[in-house]
Image (cartoon, grey):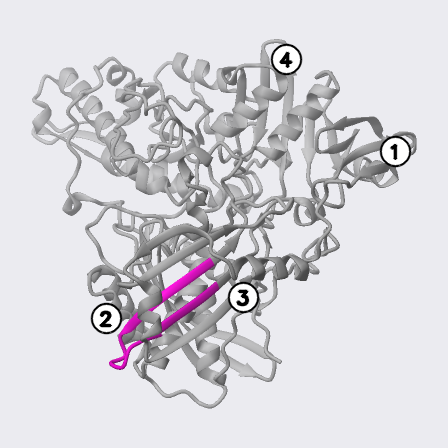
Amino acid sequence: MRFALENVLDPALSRRTFLKSAAAGAGVFLIGVHVPFATRAIAQEATPPPNVDPNMFLRIDPDGTVTIISKHFEMGQGASTGMATLVAEELGADWSKVRIAFAPNNPKVYNNLAFGTFQGTGGSTATAEAWEQMRTVGAGARMMLVAAAAARWGVSPNEITVDKGVVAHSASGKRATFGDLAVEAMQVPVPTDVPLKTPNEWKLIGSRLPRLDSVAKTTGTAMFAMDVRRPGMLTAVVARPPRFGATVASFDAAPAKAITGVVDVVQVPSGVAVLAKDTWSAMRGRDALKVTWDESKAETRSTEEMLAEYRKLAATPGLNAGRRGDAATKLASAAKTVEAEFTLPFLAHAPMEPMNGVMELRADGAEIWSGCQLHSIDEIVAAQVLGFQPAQIHINTLFAGGSFGRRGNSVGDWTAELAAITKAIGGRAPVHLVWTREDDIHGGFYRPMVLHKIKAGVDAQGALSGWQHTIVCKSILTGTPFESFGVKDGVDGSSVEGVADTPYAIGDFSVDLHNAQTAVPVLWWRSVGHSHTATAMEMTIDELARLAGKDPVAFRIDLLAKDPRAAAVVKLAAEKGGWGEKLPAGRGRGIAYHMSFGTRVALVADVTVEGPRIDVDRVVAVVDCGIAVNPDLVVAQVEGAVGFALSAVLRNEVTLDKGQIQQSNFHDYEPTRISDMPVVQVHIVPSTEKPSGIGEPGVPPLVPAIGNAVYAATGKRLRSVPFRLG
């Protein structure tokens, strides 16, 4: 029996069916090896012992097709292709015969090694945490295939070679494909001592391999949660309160039920759900629904009122988020000082595919089909709502049309909502919960609004002399399952990352934090705290350099003397970006450097300013992310980061008027258009270091690089994002 890839991605196929069919298939070879390395545990429990179950990570079919069971889900970042590359390299596979499938939810087997006993994709950890584990999976499988061939042919394993899916013994001329040997290899004990290839032996790692999901996505055969159709399925949309913190006081379901196609109306913790035979009917039913909201505990402030409170907080001592030296004393004797306030708005994630998922309730558990980013969160919240154990929740992970942090919700909001609706109707039908674009932008989760207040100085010799930094920001982690490891003495590490741990050698430095209070829900947004801290740090560094009469590049390099990799990135960016070249009037060039998720990135931005208009002409990026497993994916992620962040530089913000979000769709929360997009030139620093993150690090330096370029063109410092001239 052959178990085809298309069955793995079929939304009708459950986890149990997948494992049962795969293990039982004649001629199917599966192998998995778990190799732990230094981890940062999220859960209280320890990382489980190494898994050596041969049914978990790799399958070889009789026709030689190799299917990698990826524990990291695919939201467009290329993680699944990266996982497959690591396995295929060590296996010696023919890339044209490599396929991917998504692992079921099982954190004891498919845990993210950077997170402990926790299954999930995020924090730019995928390649970094799986670097040794997935290569060991491939190498172990290769050794088992070689052992099977050696036994069949009666030769020494040392005389056998493996290349492009073929196992060969040159002395005898014998050859066999992976598929030919699958059954025998499956009987070989999983090796415990698995040597890995050296870099000079790599044929796939470091190569620009085509993505494994491109064809399915371009031909429309890739399965997303929005594509799932189950027998008798009902579509649900939810009427949520117009102000955060409000709850349902009462509702009249009759007008909604009068709409053709509407089947039921039920109240759930997040609002009132309308279920119908199709999405359009559900939306029309919701429009007709009459709900009275209790807004006694709702957020009713407007954006400017909230910022006024932020400023009052910033004028008072905050929580100690970092101290070294004596910043106040140094500043008192500084030759020159700069005082600056930076404000950055709430931002929506706005993925192309809004939140949605399908659930079927059964007597022994529930099954979910979704673009699942944090399996461990989603299985737990679904189980809690339904009264099951997490092991009774089966998640079929599908492709996701973007996330930028939204699908990796720390409280599993949309999964909990799906479970609540399914439970409310007694599980009598499968439920497809659909968030519209307006639902997500108008009432989802947001990058926190942030205020930075900085006072910094330089001495008579132009050296940095004291830096006081205050941040006002709502905590992302407080009140979530991640609080126990991410919040210490009231300080949320994600609020101050990129400042408190700056790589710059600032001898006298203080960082204070105020945790702003609001009912507006906040969540990590691509690059999390670095998305705002890089702006404040890099624009201030640039201003201090000018104040000291020094070149901004040289000033940064001096402060990075203890981090030669960082200094090298800045130097190369300046070289590739044409730093020092004279530009015509109205044009400016700016630089910014930032390290996040273990990756060092420097961006040089060229802008043209005409009146109030800012055009970004070119962005030169230099990236040190360790070994680039697939350089094409690295380039794509940096290009994508520029495109993603550019809309936040030029126009996007989420604002409140008396507690109500003003933006709703792409007409007033407009993504970067192709006409906005600058030329992006990406240079990857060659490295022998282990890979570090790449999905997010391209975002943080963009705002300050453009801001510094605008200053170079106009002499004006813009400290409120999005940037506006005039």
- First in sequence, mark 4 or 3: give its number: 4
Quadrant of the image containing the C terminus = bottom right
Q: On residue 256, which mark appears?
A: 1
Mark 4 against mark 2, which lies toward the viewer?
Answer: 2
Task: Give the left or right position of residue 224, taking residue 279 as reference.
Answer: left
Mark 1 against mark 2, which lies toward the viewer?
Answer: 2
Q: Secondary structure at mark 4?
A: strand
Amino acid at circle 4: Arg
In front here: 98 or 419? 419
Residue identifier under label 2: 558
Q: Whole-percent x and y of residue 81?
A: 38, 41
Amino acid at circle 1: Ala
Q: Which residues are magenta?
A: 453-470
Contact between labelled residues 2 and 4, with CB atoms less than 8 Å apart: no
Q: Mark 2 packing: few (<14 Cα in 10 Å), some, or many (20+)?
A: few
Task: Give the left or right position of residue 484, taking residue 201 as reference.
Answer: right
Residue identifier under label 4: 362
Please tell me which residue is depicted at 58% across the width and 28% down the height of the picture. Answer: 369
The magenta stretch spans residue 459: yes
Is 8 placed above or below 646 here? above
Q: Secondary structure at mark 1?
A: helix
Separation of marks 4 and 3 at Cα, in angstroms:
48 Å
- First in sequence, mark 4 or 2: give its number: 4
In front here: 460 or 550? 460
Please tell me which residue is depicted at 51% across the width and 25% down the height of the picture. Answer: 7
